[in-house]
Image (cartoon, rainbow, N blue to C red):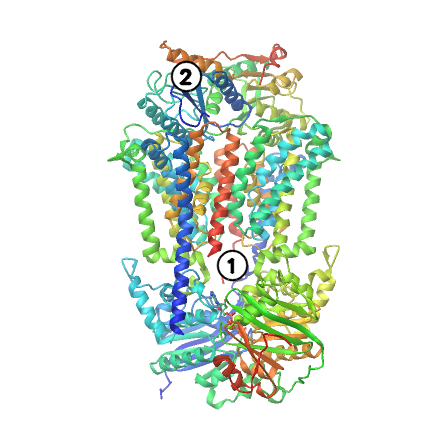
Amino acid sequence: MTQATRTVLCMRDIKKSFSGVSALRGVDFELKAGEIHALVGENGAGKSTLIKIMTGAYRRDSGVMDYGDPVTFQNPTEAQAVGIVAVYQEIHLVGFRTVAENIFLGREPHRFGIIDRRRMNTETSEILERLGLDIDPRSLVSSLNIAHRQMVAIARAISFGARVLILDEPTSSLTETEVSVLFNVMRRLKSEGTSIVYVSHRFEELYAVCDRVTVLRDGCNIVTQSLATLNRLELVCYMLGREPEEVSKGVTAFAGRSQNAVNRPVLLQAEALKYKKRLDGVSIEMRHGEIVGLAGLLGSGRSETVRTLFGAEPLEGGTVKLEGNLLSLRDPHDAIDAGIAFLSEDRKADGIIPELSVRENLTLAALPNLTQWGIVSRKRQNELVDRFMQRLGIKATSAEQKIHELSGGNQQKVLLARWLCKNTKLLLLDEPTRGIDVGAKGEIQRLIAELAEQGLGVLMISSEVEELVEGSQRVIVLRDGRSIAELSGEQKNIKAILHVMAEGARQEGVKQSRTDNE
Amino acid sequence: QSGCVREKTKKIVGFSQTENIGPWRIAETNSIKEEAAKRKKTYDFLMTDAQGQTSKQFSDIEDLIARQVDAIFLAPREYEGLTPALEAARAAKIPVFLIDREAAGRPGEHFVSFLGSDFIVQGRRVGKWLAQATNGKASIVELTGTAGSSVAIDRAKGFRDAIASYPNMKIIATQTADFSRAAAVRVMENIIQAKGSDITAVYAHNDEMALGAIQALKSAGMKPGKDVIVGSIDGQKAALEAINRGELGVSVESNPRFGPLVFATMEKYFAGKKIPPRIILEDRLFDVTNAKDFVQEAY
Amino acid sequence: MAATRSLAVAGMRLSKRLARLLTSQGVLLMLLSLAVFASFRYETFLTPLNLMNIMRQNSMLAIVALGMTVVILSGGIDLSVGSLVALGGVVAALLAGQGSFVAIVGGIASTTLLGVVNGLLVSRARLQPFVVTLFTASAARGLALSITEERSIAVPSAASGLVWLGRGFIGFVPVPVLIVALLYFAAWFMLHKSRLGLHVFAIGDNEEASRLMGVNPNRVKLAVYTFSGMLSGLAGVVLAGRLGAGQPVAAFGWETDAIAATVMGGTFLVGGQGSVFPTLVGVLLLGMMYNLLNLEGTITPWWQLVLRGGFLLMVVIFQQRIAQRE
Amino acid sequence: MNSKKPDLSWKNLWNPNLGAPAALLILYVANAVFTPRFATVSNTLNMLLQVSTTMFIAVGMTFVIASRGIDLTVGSTMALVSVIVALLIKYGITVAISFALCCALLVGLLNGFLISRLKLDPLITTLAALILWRGVAQVIGDGQLVPFTHPTFEALGKGYLGFIPIQVVIAAVVIAGAFFCIRSTLFGRQIVAVGGNEKAARLAGIRAERVKYIVYIVSALLAGLAGLVETARLGMGDPSKVGVNAEFEAIAAVVVGGTPFSGGRANVLGTVVGALIMQVISTSFNMLLIPFTWSLVLKSVIILFAIFLQRPKEV
Ligand SMILES: Nc1ncnc2c1ncn2[C@@H]1O[C@H](COP(=O)(O)OP(=O)(O)OP(=O)(O)O)[C@@H](O)[C@H]1O
Ligand SMILES: Nc1ncnc2c1ncn2[C@@H]1O[C@H](COP(=O)(O)OP(=O)(O)OP(=O)(O)O)[C@@H](O)[C@H]1O
Ligand SMILES: [Mg+2]
Ligand SMILES: [Mg+2]
């Protein structure tokens, strides 16, 4: 057991505002030697901002930071130099450079300015091996999938041998195995005396590795306490600022919802979808009012499935029928016309239009409906925006705030609202609750269920198997670009799903998915 | 096919033109091309366009040398900067005939001869004419040609020489209008705003700019030819028409039709005759007395 | 499982390599086929004199294009190069009376200084490179015209070093060509072997990420614009030596030629991807086009413009096709 | 509690969006004081007259830049329109104008095709097209000036409506239209969305390809309009000098006016202010008779300063 007593890093009364809007209003934070310190809070509570101030990526407006001596970092390089290293929430890597170059960027082994590439590559191999990763150090980062990129970012941070390691939602796109590898590494680093700041919205993870927790709410720190003495419910209450009895029970907000859509008419029939080498025979059938989960390992083709259904990637084989009508999906416009909506897993790249306001982002898809003679009705736009901002509880200074200034969770709500304010029949959700705090997550899950009750069909991808089990009526499992099994009723449990995801559909009693249809 | 395999019986003539913008240059190019076309039987004709860049013109001459032409007509971009090219031609024993502008170098050595007008004299003649027309008392706006071009520099110099002896002739504004009518309209409008009715004369380095200035004067409600006397250089058709309308006072000719002369000079040279180092063209002066007679033949 | 994956990764890398090679060799291929065409059509094309002409004539643009390529790789653009060439040449010519060394150093120093100004405005003041360099270009042009009173300045024959730089030979290799070769090798080495080079690629690719990973983008930007300014000055000095005069109106529009050459070489305008040698091929392709138009000698200037524009467009489309295949 | 430092509050007060209007105001006032006859009605009208062609192009350029593109062909489009209208005016004004604008449309269509369909980079594509179309214009006009007389058509560039030049009126209409378009129409919002994040816009059902197509067409048509006005004003078609460097003037106006190259924002009024700033500078330099060469230097420095005032804040 490490005796975590010495303070490594101490922040007092940190304030930061962005063009007049306060993100942090006087936060105190203390990190002890050799502890894993969880930093939690709702979306927009200020976690990422606090972290960026720690590393000098942002300048604080006021407050002191003590790292042995009082320090002010002008940029992340200075922080790195004294042993404070971060993995930021948005993966920050350079796409067209190799893995090794990314891992050593800014501190390349060199002689007279000439890089020692061999050393860089061998050391990178070692680091990756320690993380159990099978990635060539010379491959380009842009050729890796999100999970691998995330692992590379983590590998980079770990390789510094830092005194303070900061991980901002590192696990949001990792699978269970990768998460457990990461935790082992974190535990080892801790035993070596490294202090770790860990941000996550997944509570199991916090309880699995963290020693203490600091809860932020609305830019203020609410409490700092040992996790051993704080149960989940209390933690949630601190985060949301509500009383225990107000906070609902159950793992996800789906729990206890009615799950009955058998008698409804068929909504979607997708058969034998093919796309490049990634999809090779995915079939999905679903009814109005049904929530269908799509499970699979990373790279199994879940995202591609929904993207092709939305016309975002060209379909190279197979048919898609909506309410019995054959669709020809050349681009998303066609899908939208048919009544399909899609929420991408990559909010920043595929979702928000950063410079535009919440109002514009929210009404983007519905604009044609709000338009007469080519002129957008501002009045109807405002009505719509007001309604949905209220209904989804979107936190923004006003509807005119730029969307990139909102926190991740609120951005996600705006994007969801973008589709809800249109008449949609089928909602395709790719990781709708990734990186979203419990409160907002619950709201979004409740919303999804509500929508389904109103007759909407929802096809949902999630890496959190609980979400699939509790939220959906059926779970379709993909593997290597094929749909291999469909689980419902009793079979739809975590163990079974994980098993099929990993091993294929040979388990007895699991219904084989039909590639030939009835 | 002039570009293809060379017929040894024919001589090749290369013409390196500075640029092909504006009526004057185009008239020059066309004159030389027409003359070459007349001698298709005996000469192949190649032309390069330096697009107003000395460095490109240097390369063009190098290319002509590599192409093994027998003579080069060169309309230099500028006085300085082509000496090395002339030296290269001399080393390759290719005679060079300079037309319309001079270049640094010795005649008979770096080039055979210079054929062209004297720009300083042109400026001087406009100056003299203006002095007479205004009785030695004028407030003059000068519209200069492309900044840095030798023509602009010489025409400015000659004009100043001429009016130096008249104490009451003052240049009250001098601005560049790039030899272009569009630019001249703009610049003149602004100067009119600043100087208003102070302006009594305009000296433009070419006809195009004079025509632009006349337009600006008219739209400002001033009467070119009466309130403001305008003088320029080139003698192009539109200018002579303007003289006939009474808007333009004078246009000193700057003859662009070098074709016959330069070919004749070259043939004399090949025939072994002695060529004078400078062949200066007689430039005429057009004003209200004679413009009518020449308007048809102008370019 | 792991083995097949690493095999797949290796395969993917190989095909990418091949594609990248093609992107650079695409222009090379075009250059060669144009050369073959020309050598059949013009008997004087394949003479040593003509080939040397092509290389020598284009060496100044090649120097400028090198600077441009590095700036573009860093995600910026430098529209001031043409004016800086003029300024460098003019300053050198004005100083030539003081001896060649002073002239050369002075010419290069003046433009390097303006390169620093570009760099500071882009990095420290966070202004957009396109605009900054557009206006420093016109400022530099104005300066060059003002200090010479709009005249060309002859280089006195006493400044033999300056003249040698533009017209001299070492053995049978023209000095400018030698300078180009040295510079391209040095730049290649810097870009691909040094830390600074890696940082140039990194900020061109993703500036924010590089910053968070400990690269100082300001310093890198300052370096690339200074480098580009310096090379422009050098090109100006060489040009002044070659022409025997410093001309304030020289190198008009070279920035667009330099950009075109860079893009023809397959460097992406968004930054982060590309290399220097393909740019050299791009320069030669442009230069050979001019050379062929001259050897043909009968195409009217306006058709020459149409051909140039069309050809450029064709190369760009061709490059795009190759890049898309990746 | 209220112990804010003054310089901090000043920094917060300073809004970078005000940079351009402030610069315009300062320039105008300074000139009113120092330049004789500057602040007169006739000179102001004169400036508006001169700036109007730049205004057309700059407005089109604002659209293009907002969609995260750039259009360098505008100058050549002007030249093309100029020759064609001058050559065809003898067949009647309607024929000439419609044919000329069709050619402008063609330029826009080609740009749109190359950039949105073939996904080429706009800068290099329009650079190549700039050379190409300038050549085509000269081929059509055989490099010559094409003079003509047609009072009705010439009124487009020389006529007055009351005491206001017709082209200023047209410019005002174009500006108002563009402002309205960006602010309130579906198309305007789609341009900004595409410029802000093309992938996301596509996934929200916007046909990004089509939007970009239209943007380049609009830009080309406005350039065509500028070419018409310029030609009418000169009373001749000029394939080699009309519209030279017009693209850079327009881009400068757009950027000085605060529309960033990174796309996703369109500030039409800013562009107007930007164009006015540049016009005030060049007019006053002409009026103060500052030598051209020095005015190049001074003008650049002033404009760089105006841009500097609007630089983004640091976080
Ligand atoms: N660059 C920025 N400009 C303006 N406002 C910002 C900026 N970055 C963050 N904010 C604001 O600061 C507040 C805190 O954001 P921050 O990203 O720190 O939240 P977070 O706790 O990390 O949330 P999440 O869990 O969603 O990541 C939010 O209200 C956000 O709108
Ligand atoms: N050949 C490849 N080249 C580049 N990227 C690839 C390739 N194959 C898969 N990927 C990337 O791997 C990731 C996972 O693929 P996909 O999205 O189909 O699976 P998924 O099950 O949806 O995974 P996720 O949980 O990340 O959404 C995707 O981001 C995809 O872009
Ligand atoms: Mg965050
Ligand atoms: Mg996915």
Mark 1, Cα crowd under 10 Å, few <14 / some 14-19 / many 20+, is few
> What subunit carries mark 1?
D
Q: Quadrant of residue A381?
A: bottom right
Q: Residues within 10 Å of mark 2 (few under 14, many from 20)?
A: many
Q: Which amino acid, mark 2?
A: Phe
Using the image, determine if residue A245 lies above or below residue A474. Answer: below
Q: Residue A90 in the image: x percent, y percent?
A: 49, 68
* Residue for badge 2: B114
Q: Is residue D270 visible?
A: no
Q: Quadrant of the N terminus of chain C?
A: bottom left
Does the rendering let one see residue D23? yes
Answer with left or right where residue B225 lies relative to residue A90: right
Residue displayed at 52% across by 56% down: D312
Number of dots carrying numbers: 2
**Residue C178, quarter of the rendered image:** top left
The outermost residue toward the left is: C171
- Name the spot of residue A356 as percent of width and height, x first: 61, 61
Of residue D299 and residue A187, the one placed in the foreground of this image is A187
Q: Chain of mark 2?
A: B
Which secondary structure, mark 1? loop
- Give the number of the mark in front: 1 or 2: 2
Image vertical order of residue C145 relative to residue A404, above or below = above
Residue at 60% of width from left, 18% of height from top?
A: B237
Compute the Cα span from label 1 to label 2. 62 Å
Residue carrying label 1: D313
Is the CB–ligand 2 distance for label 2 below 8 Å? no
Which image quadrant for residue C44? top left
